[in-house]
Structure formats: structure tokens, C-alpha cells
Image (cartoon, grey):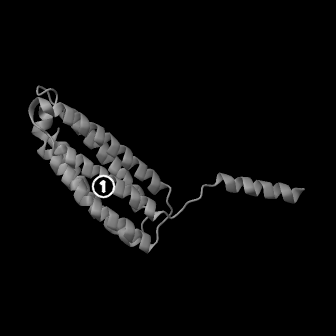
Amino acid sequence: MFRSLLFGLFVASLAQCSVIKRDAPGIVASLNAISSQLATMNSTLNTFPGGAGNTLVALQVQGEAQTLLDTINNGTKVANQTGPLDVNDSALVVDAVLTLQPNIYGVLNHIIAAKPDFDTAVLGLASAAILVKSDLTNLKNSTDQLFSATVSKLVTDIQNLAPLVQALVDLYFVEAINTYS
């Protein structure tokens, strides 16, 4: 009786424990999804017509920024649910991050260049800059959270180099945010 009770408690406690998996492919898939969303955003930014026609494009960019934010937040959840990665898995994740970086820079540079278009985005009469700045701030904060969650899973040697990568990404975000301030 005591033995079956003890076994039952053991099984119940195991059921309450979450299984932490090493999921480099999940993190990589999340980073690839972010990269794809950035490509979509960059393509949309290429369609700014100028003047009153900017309203629809600005709304589309706003929607895509929200989708990107959701994708980044999902990536953070995936990274948080992942256990520590070994050297090979860490290398896969680093490769995905290095592939993602130019896409981040490209979109942020494009957003900076599109400032005049966003300044007349509301029916050709008013600025959407405050919305862009808010989106950029939210995206930066979420990107920082994703970066932190992902880096915490990598092997120590790579973790030590990560601040350099994050500093570069943050520099681009700060420049874009300042453009809209």
C-alpha cells in the first residue's frame, strides 16, 4: 500500500515537471520565420508611392510590424522552452543569427530612408512617425528578449561573443528609433 502510494506520488510529480528539450531546430525555425517576415516587410516598404497613397502602405507596414513582433515573441517562447545546447546545436543557431542580421539591418535602414513617406502617411497630411517609433521600440525590446533567451542556451564560448552581435543590432535599432523621435 505504502509502496503504491509512493509510486503514485512519484508519477504525479513527474507529470508536473516540464520536459526541457534541446531544440536547436525550433530556435532556427523561429529565426528563419523572423527572416521571412523581415523580407515581407522590406518588400512592402519598397512600395511606398509617396503622398496620400502612403496611408494604405503605412497600414500594411503597421500590420506586418505586429506580425513580426508576434513572430519574435514566439521565438522567445521557443528559446525559453529549450534546454542548454551543445556545440553543434549552438553553431546551428549562430549560423541562423548571422543569416538574420543583414535582414534586420536592411529593414531598419529602409525604415530610416522611408521617414519622409511616413511623415505624410496619414492621407498625405499627417505623420505616422509616432506609430513607427512605437513599433520600433516594441520590436527592439522583443528582439532583446529573444536574443537574451537564445544566448542563454548557447555554449559558454559563444555566449561570450554574443554581446558584440547584440550591440550591433541595438545600434541599428537606436538609429532608427532616433530618426522617428
Q: Nearer the viewer, residue 60 or 18?
A: 60
Q: Which residue is mark 1?
A: 35
Q: Secondary structure at mark 1?
A: helix
- Residue at 25% in and 37% down: 60
Task: Left or right? Give the position of 67 relative to 43.
Answer: right
> Is residue 67 depicted above or below 88 in this figure?
above
Is the N terminus in the top left, top right, bottom left or bottom right quadrant?
A: bottom right
- Taking the image as shown, residue 13 lies to the left or right of residue 135, namely right
Q: Position of residue 45 (x, y in %)?
A: 18, 44
Can residue 168 be seen here? The reply is no
Q: Position of residue 93 (x, y in %)?
A: 38, 65
Identified at 46% across, 54% down, the residue is 78
Q: Residue at x 45, y 59 (%)?
A: 26
Taking 169 as reference, is 153 left or right?
Answer: right
The C terminus - image quarter: top left
Q: Which image quarter: residue 8?
A: bottom right
- The answer to which image quadrant residue 33 occupies is bottom left
Above-or-below relation of 175 to 57? below
In the rendered image, residue 155, in percent from the top left (x then y), is placed at 42, 70
Q: Position of residue 41 (x, y in %)?
A: 24, 46
The reply to whether residue 125 is visible in this rendering is yes
Q: Residues within 10 Å of mark 1 (few under 14, many from 20)?
A: many
Q: Residue drawn at (74%, 56%), measured in percent from left and top? A: 11
